[in-house]
Amino acid sequence: MNAKHMVLCGAWIFVILANPSIFGQPRGAPRTATPVAAASGAPAITILAVATGALLRSQATSNASLDLGRVSYFKGTSAPGESSRKNSESFVISTRFALKIDCPGSSASSQVKVTVSRLDAAASHAITIDGTTLGPVEQTLVQSMRCGSAGEHRLDLEIPVSTPAGSIGSTVAFMATLNR
Amino acid sequence: MKNGFILTSVLSAFALTGVANAQTGSGTLGVSATVQGSINMTFVTDASGLAVTGTTTSTASLPFGNVSMYSGTVPTNVTKTIHATSFDLSTPFDVRVDLANSASTTYTLTATLAAADSINTWSLGAIDISAAAPHALTAAGVFGTAVPYTLKLTVPASATAGSISNSINFTAVGG
């Protein structure tokens, strides 16, 4: 291998490491592990409770959990910040939360796109955010929002009457991408 | 070597562009709930019965209105039967029990008169419930179906005229 080949190999290794998406790995692949601190310039997502929403627990940077408590078809929910409604074959528990996006190192006018997906496929329930039913494929939640701003969202948990009593749970993944 | 340097520069620029475009951040929200099985009972006006006030709810009433043994009329779908020393007022009404998030297949239904009545006789079908003790109506009720029961109130001719009022508490338990 001569010097020219070494340079070429080095360049391609750098390309692969720096930009894996060009080799088919989706840039927006959901992350299930606790996110590490965002690299400088990358958007940072903070999930916040809102005054009209359910109790939300922050677990770590960019991670939070929402326990909607005991719910039932005929009694709905009694937890503050939650509402319920009955359909013929299911019931829906609704609450609200907020997403704040910061973009360290970016200008104040920078914008981000926010997508959302669901990391599990449990058929015991469905999750809808702002009217969009979540699945494994990323869907746009906010087409463009300013870095440093926060937006409020509605989350609906729909549970069929056929779902056995017991605990249910899902993980919702958010991805913020800086618009250039 | 000069060409290699140029190529390296171009590729590096391309790679750095990729870094710039890949500025993403992620977050996760865990959502959980505890689903509880629940059962609901409602009273429904029977097709052949007196209109239930509060039909399709779990608190209803059957207003017989003003009645007398020998005169007057009774409301639509109320049957009056005169005996030697008493008269009956009867009407069917429906009880519907629904279930959600439970594996129960049947239910038991009991009825208890709220206040014992030693003058008048209160019956559901053939069961005298006047003693204000729980009485089983069924041990194999079918969910989601309106089941008719006939309430019969027997008033003795010797009873003093006046208002008669009582409540029947129904309890459904999934089996």
Image (cartoon, coloured by chain):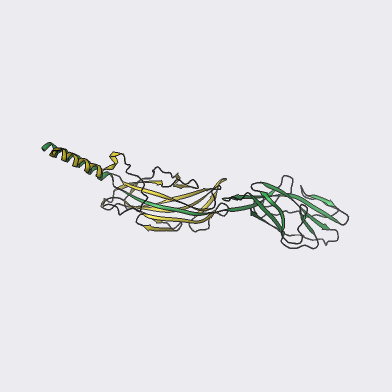
Q: Which quadrant of the figure has residue A18?
A: top left
Q: Position of residue B25 (x, y in %)?
A: 32, 50
Spot the residue most to the front.
Answer: A1
Q: Is residue B167 visible?
A: no
Q: Nearer the viewer, residue A66 or B3?
A: B3
Q: In the picture provided, is A66 more to the left or to the right than B165?
A: left
Q: Which quadrant of the figure has residue B61?
A: bottom right
Spot the residue most to the top.
Answer: B3
Q: Where is residue B171 in the image (x, y as percent from the top left)?
A: 67, 56
Q: Nearer the viewer, residue B152 or A169?
A: A169
Q: Which quadrant of the figure has residue B87?
A: bottom right
Q: Position of residue A95 (x, y in %)?
A: 47, 53
Q: In which quarter of the image is the N terminus of chain B?
A: top left
Q: Where is residue B105 in the image (x, y as percent from the top left)?
A: 63, 49
Instruction: Give the vertical position of B162 relative to A127 (above or below).
Output: below
Q: In the picture provided, is A131 more to the left or to the right than B127?
A: left
Colour of chain B, in one word, is green
Colour of chain A, in one word, is yellow
Name the residue: 16% across, 40% down.
A6
Spot the residue most to the right.
Answer: B84
Q: Nearer the viewer, residue A1 or B131?
A: A1
Counting labels gives: 0
Name the residue: 13% across, 36% down.
B3
Spot the residue most to the left.
Answer: B2
Name the residue: 81% across, 56% down.
B154
Q: In the picture provided, is A123 more to the left or to the right than A34?
A: right
Name the residue: 56% across, 45% down.
A89
Q: Can residue B41 be seen in this view?
A: yes
